[in-house]
Image (cartoon, rainbow, N blue to C red):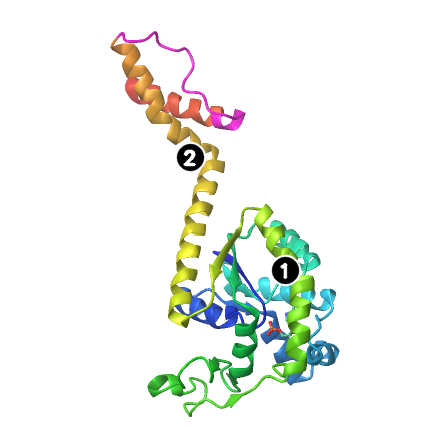
Amino acid sequence: MRIVLLGAPGSGKGTQAQRLAERSGMPQISTGDLLRTAVTRGTELGLKAKAVMEEGRLVDDALVLGMIRERLGQPDARAGFILDGFPRNLVQAAALDGLLAELGQPLDAVVQFEVAPAELVRRISGRRTCADCGRVFNVLTSAPPSGAAAICPRTGAPHRLTQRADDNEATVTERLRVYDEKTRPLIAFYQSRGLLRAIDAAGEIDTVTQRLAQALGIAARRAAAARTAKSPVRRAVRAKPAARAAKSRARRGKVPRRKTPARTATKSGRRAASSVKRRGARRRRR
Ligand code: AMP
């Protein structure tokens, strides 16, 4: 599946993206993580992004789009991905649409995480990240990790918990303002495309994981149904039982036999349906 997780800073999309990635095998693609890595490594991109990130503003679209284009082109993203923190504004959303259209891989679902503003601030102030493996914990909203969960898979030693530089009060206020101004309009954007599902992201992490799984299950079934409806061969196959029933009624003299097989809506569908009919006739002659 190709999924976007949409939500304000602190809404838990990073935590849920991590869990979903572990369970599904799809990569979690977090533009925030990619940018932080660039800052730590001191790359050209990192040097350009650092000050903007510290102020809680959005990094230049061209830089982020270049980075995401490269990441989505990597082999592990071909079978699906979970986008976390991208897109962040309408320009990025339109560019993502174009990029995925080029790759012939449209989005399957956008899940919006709903959390009250006071809870967002509380979650952000308790957020800690392991400096070695990047796993996210919260010292205010969940119990400290214990047993195997307390050990970093990278180092084999206990996690080294650090607080993000932009998780301070002043920057958080700016990040929430930027979310309302630039990112919130994406809700209507994806709603109008029939891709949006909103979930209540307050409460226990496990409960939110279940709500996310349910939302994605519904989205996956819808995407599969939409793909089936678009396929002319599938339409013809679906039309086959109806055509057979019509022939059988005609044979039994119940209704006059139609000259044409059951009609399908489009030219390509009709072509596929008549090829099904020709195959049936050949089989009967043999
Ligand atoms: P996050 O880890 O998603 O909270 O992102 C941390 C910071 O990285 C943000 O406050 C922005 O400065 C920057 N950032 C992350 N993703 C994007 C994006 N898609 N567009 C622009 N800036 C971003």
Q: Which of the two labelled residues, at mark 2 and mark 1, occupies the earlier sequence position?
A: 1
Q: Position of residue 171 (x, y in %)?
A: 67, 79
Q: In this view, does 233 lie above or below 181?
A: above
Q: Name the kind of residue labelled 1 in the image.
A: Arg
For ligand 1, give the image quadrant: bottom right
Q: Nearer the viewer, residue 270 or 95?
A: 95
SS for callout 2: helix
Q: Which of 32 and 194 is in front in this view?
A: 194
In the rendered structure, the answer to whether residue 118 lies left or right of residue 69 reads left
Q: Give the range drawn in magenta.
A: 253-269
Label 2, residues with CA under 10 Å away: few <14, some 14-19, many ≥20: some
Q: Where is residue 85 in the image (x, y as percent from the top left)?
A: 59, 67
Mark 1 lies within 8 Å of ligand 1 (Cβ measured): no
Q: Residue furthest bottom?
A: 157
The main secondary structure of the magenta stretch is loop
Q: How many labels does the image show?
A: 2
Q: Residue 225 carries which label?
A: none
Give the CA separation, mark 2 to mark 1: 38 Å
User: According to the image, label 2 marks what residue?
Assistant: 234
- Residue under the point 47% across and 41% down: 226
Instruction: Indicate the quadrant containing the C terminus: top left, top right, bottom left or bottom right.
Output: top left
User: According to the image, label 1 marks what residue?
Assistant: 184
Q: Is residue 266 magenta?
A: yes
